[in-house]
Image: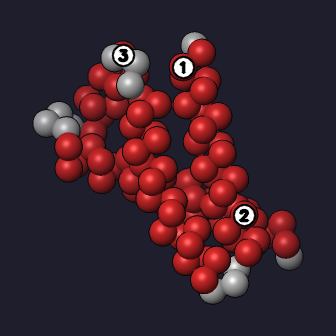
Amino acid sequence: MIKKEIFIGFIIGILANSIGILLYILLFSDLGIEETIREAIKGDFFGILIAAGAILNFVPFFLFIKKDRIYKARGVLMASIFAALVIAVFKIF
């Protein structure tokens, strides 16, 4: 049961991050979604794009904390840590 709650929180965190990335692209980029991602990878600012999308993880995290869904909040936190690891990998390679 606990693992399921953490997994649900992780999936919600990944979805929130993805939606955050899409919102950032739609609001601040003159290019399309695919072109922006391609240019971000080529221009070495894909990590910044992921970090900007991760800001949206605050919403489900604090919502879960407020509703006393601690294990789901842990899952969202794990998704944020996963995003940080992805950023580190993109910076290294």
- Residue 19 as seen in the image, left or right of residue 93: left
Observer-side mark, 2 or 3, equals 2
Rendering quarter of residue 9: bottom right
Residue 10 visible in the snapshot: no
Q: Which residue is mark 2?
A: 74
Q: Quadrant of the N terminus?
A: bottom right
Q: Position of residue 7 (x, y in %)?
A: 73, 63
Q: Secondary structure at mark 2?
A: helix
Q: Residues within 10 Å of mark 3 (few under 14, many from 20)?
A: few
Q: Which residue is mark 3?
A: 42
Q: Which one is closest to the eye, mark 3 or mark 1?
A: 1
Across and down, in percent, residue 91 comes to 54, 19
Label 1 residue SS: helix
- The residue most toward the left is 30
Q: How many marks?
A: 3
Amino acid at the residue labelled 2: Arg
SS under mark 3: helix
Q: Give the CA distance from mark 3 to mark 1.
A: 12 Å
Q: Is residue 55 above or below residue 37?
A: below
Q: Quadrant of residue 85?
A: top right
Q: Which mark is residue 91?
A: 1
Residue 69: % across, % down:
70, 80
Mark 3: which amino acid? Lys
The residue that appears at 72% across and 63% down in the rendered structure is 74
How is the structure coloured here?
Answer: secondary structure
Real-space Cα separation, disc 2 to disc 1, in angstroms: 26 Å
The vertical placement of 74 against 31, above or below, is below
